[in-house]
């Protein structure tokens, strides 16, 4: 993996990272917003401590552990990636409540256009802020966006110490099994 200087990472602030999407996906994963490493590389969930890629594999969504640079391969499995807020920041707490609300509206429009079977928001706090649902918890939600079901997953950030890679993989696998039945 390429090493970036602090200056190079800071230069990636506010940069946009293209979505990995297609019409009719099985699951569209939705992060909070790109971190600086993701923005610097152009690859989602690129920070070395982020557990998204290992958990995706452990849960059975992918047949092997993908590297962030292989993100386009997700489309062949009917999977994609987007974000609630498009701009990159060092930390999610740099985002305003308005950015989350605006991001939720834009995400709903994107989901209505792309029509995935499931939208999987990775991070209950981001879901609550984006969709003004303070009582949401990890798991399937009652909310639907058009015909798309919504599932909230634990945030795979290494900062989320409440969930291990194994317990996250179990929750992701619950979604995978639901998506296979749909």
Image (cartoon, rainbow, N blue to C red):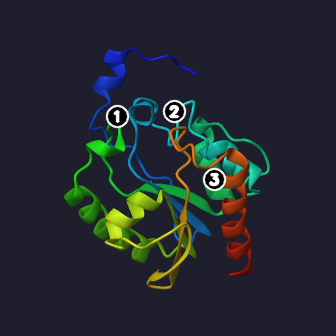
Which is nearer the N-term, disc 2 or disc 1?
2
* C-alpha span from label 3 to label 1: 25 Å
Judging depth in this view, the residue of 114 and 102 nearest the camera is 102
Measure the C-alpha gap from mark 3 to mark 2.
18 Å
Asked if the residue at tag 2 contacts the one at tag 3, i.e. Cβ–Cβ closer than 8 Å, the answer is: no
Which residue does the numbered mark 1 point to in the structure image? 90
> Looking at the picture, does residue 24 appear above or below residue 51?
below
Q: Circles 2 and 1: CB distance less than 8 Å?
A: no
For the N terminus, give its image quadrant: top right
Q: Residue at x 61, y 42 (%)?
A: 51
**Which is nearer the N-term, disc 3 or disc 2?**
2
* Horizontal side, residue 94 vs residue 23: left or right: left
Neighbourhood count class around disc 2 (C-alpha, 10 Å): few under 14, some 14–19, many 20 upward: many
Q: Position of residue 111 (x, y in %)?
A: 43, 72
In this view, 37 is above or below 113: above
- The residue wearing badge 2 is 47
Who's the residue at 35% across and 45% down the image?
Answer: 92
Residue in view at x 57 percent, y 32 percent: 49
- Tell me where residue 171 appears, x and y as whole percent: 67, 62
Q: In which quarter of the image is residue 103?
A: bottom left
């Amino acid at each position: 993996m390429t090493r970036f200087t602090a200056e190079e990472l800071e230069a990636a602030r506010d940069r946009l990272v293209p979505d990995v999407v297609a019409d009719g996906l099985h699951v569209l994963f939705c992060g909070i917003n790109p971190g600086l490493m993701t923005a610097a590389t152009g690859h989602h969930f690129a920070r070395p401590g982020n557990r998204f890629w290992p958990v995706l594999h452990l849960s059975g969504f992918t047949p092997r552990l993908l590297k962030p640079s292989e993100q386009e391969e997700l489309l062949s499995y009917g999977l994609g990636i987007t974000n609630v807020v498009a701009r990159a920041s060092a930390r999610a707490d740099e985002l305003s409540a308005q950015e989350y609300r605006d991001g939720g509206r834009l995400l709903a429009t994107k989901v209505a256009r792309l029509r995935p079977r499931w939208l999987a928001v990775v991070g209950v706090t981001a879901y609550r802020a984006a969709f003004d649902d303070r009582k949401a918890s990890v798991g399937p939600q009652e909310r639907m966006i058009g015909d798309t079901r919504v599932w909230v997953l634990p945030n795979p950030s290494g900062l989320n110490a409440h969930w291990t890679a194994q317990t996250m993989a179990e929750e992701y696998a619950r979604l995978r099994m639901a998506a296979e039945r749909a």
